[in-house]
Amino acid sequence: MGGPVVVADPAVLEVEFRHVHRLLDPAASGVQRWVVEVRAGGERVGALRAARGLFWQAGNLRERLGDESPFLAAVSAVLLSPDGSFSAEFEAAVDMANNVLVVEELELDGPWADPLVAASLVSSVIDRLTDNGFAVILPREAAGVAGAALLDEAGALLAGEDFGDDLRIIDTALAAPEEAAHRVQRLLAERSRSGGLTRPDPATVDGWEEHDDYDDEEGWSLTAQTRAVLRLALEDLAAAAWAEAAALGSEALTAKAAGLFASLPRVTFYQDASWRRQMARTFDDLAGDLEAGRDLVPGCTGEEMALHLAIARAEELQQDRPRLVADTVQGLAADPYDFDWEACSDLLFEDHDVLMLFDSKLDGIEDGGSEVNQALGMVNLAPRDWFSPFDPGHARDPHRGFRRD
C-alpha cells in the first residue's frame, strides 16, 4: 500500500521576474507582458506568463489586449466593452479595479506541479505586479490554456471568485485574498519544514487542505524554533523598554508620543519611572523563562501585555528580518508548527482581558469597582496592579532586582 511520498522541498524554489520593451515602442503603452521563471537549485522548473493591462494608459484596453494573444483577446472581450470601458458585469464583480493583471499560462515540471506551489507563485506575482486597484484574472480549467487546471486550483486557494465558466477574478481591494495568500504561504512553509511536497494517497483527504492543528490544546507546546524567535523578540523589546524608561523617567506621555511605552494602553501614560522599570523587567523575566527552558506562563498583567507585544514583534521579525530569524534558529529542529503566532496568541493566555484596555469605548473598564469589570470577573487591569501576581504561590522572587541595575 502506498502512502504519501516526499518528492520536493519548496524552500529551494526561486523566481525571477522579466519584462523587456523598447523605450520608444508605442506598442508597450498600456500593456506589459511579464515572464516569471521558476528555478529549483538553479535549474529551470517552470514559468508563469502574465500581462498587466493599465486602463488609463492604453487608450482602448480591449483593443490593446486583443492584439497580444488569443487568450488575452478572449479575456478582454469579457471584461471590456467595444469602446474600451469596463463591462457592467466586470464592474459588478470587483470593488474598485482600474487595471487588470491577466495570468495567461503556467508550466511547472514534475513534482513542482502542485496547487500550493502554483498558488504561492501567483501570490508572489500579485504582490509584485499589482496594488489594490487591480483585478487579477486567472483561467479556469475549461479555458484550455497551458496550466489552466493548476491555475484554477490556485485561484480557488487564493479566494478567487468564479467569473463565468472560463475565468476567476481575485479582487486585490478585498481582505479575503490577502488572508488566503498568507494561509497558502503558511501551508507551503509547513510542507517544507515537514519534509517537502507530497503526493497524497487518493484514499486520504485532499493533500493541500488545511488540518485542524489544535483540537487537543493539552498536546500543544511551543516548538524550539518558535521559542528562539520569541526570546529574540522579548530581548529586542527589553532593550527598547530599558532605554525608554531611562530617557522618560516619570514624564507623562501624550497621544502623539512614539515608542514602546506609547504603544501601551492610554491608561498607562501617566505612570512613573518605577512602574516603567517594572514593565521593562517583564520582558527580561519572560526571556529568562525561555532561556531556562521553562514553560511560558505570564504571571501578572504586565507579563501578559509583554507577551502580546512579543508575539507581534516575533511575527514582524519573521517577515521583516528573515535572515536574522534564520540565524537565530540555525541548528534547531524544524517542526511543521513553527511560527504559528495565531496559536501562540490563542493558547499562551488564560484570557485576553488586558487587550480590552486598547478600546477607547471601554474606558474605565480597568476600575475594579465598575459593573462591567465585576460582571466579567476581571482582575488587575488597573496599571497599579499590573505587577501583582495572579497566583501568589507561584510568584517570582520579589528580591530578584532588576537585571539592568
Image (cartoon, rainbow, N blue to C red):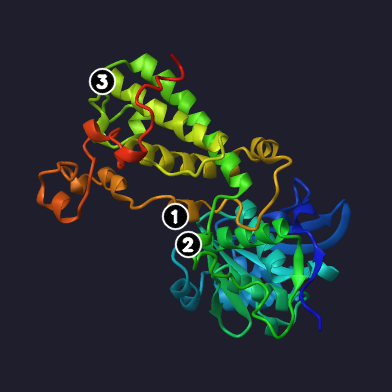
User: Can you tell which quarter of the image residue 102 is in?
Assistant: bottom right
According to the image, label 3 marks what residue? Answer: 272
Near-viewer residue (304 or 308): 304
Near-viewer residue (141 or 109): 109
Q: Position of residue 376 (x, y in %)?
A: 19, 55
According to the image, label 2 marks what residue? Answer: 217
Above or below 132: residue 363 = above
**Furthest-front residue in view?**
393
Q: Is residue 379 left or right of residue 216?
A: left
Q: Is residue 348 left or right of residue 317?
A: left
Q: Is residue 82 left or right of residue 257?
A: right
Mark 2 in CB contact with mark 3 (< 8 angstroms): no
Camera-near label (1 vs 3) is 1
Secondary structure state at the residue bearing disc 2 = helix
Q: Earlier in the sequence, mark 1 or mark 3?
A: 3
Tell me, yes or no, if residue 300 can be seen here: no
Camera-near label (1 vs 2) is 2
Q: CA–CA distance between discs 1 and 3?
A: 32 Å
Near-viewer residue (41 or 35): 41
Tell me, yes or no, if residue 243 can be seen here: yes
Secondary structure state at the residue bearing disc 1 = helix
**Residue flagged by tag 3: what amino acid is it?**
Asp
Above or below 49: residue 204 = below
Q: Position of residue 316 (x, y in %)?
A: 53, 41
User: How many other residues sit within 10 Å of disc 2, few (<14), some (14-19) or many (≥20)?
Assistant: few
Residue 347, label in figure? 1
Above or below 243: residue 267 = below
Secondary structure state at the residue bearing disc 3 = loop
**How many labels sit on residues?**
3
User: How many other residues sit within 10 Å of disc 3, few (<14), some (14-19) or many (≥20)?
Assistant: some
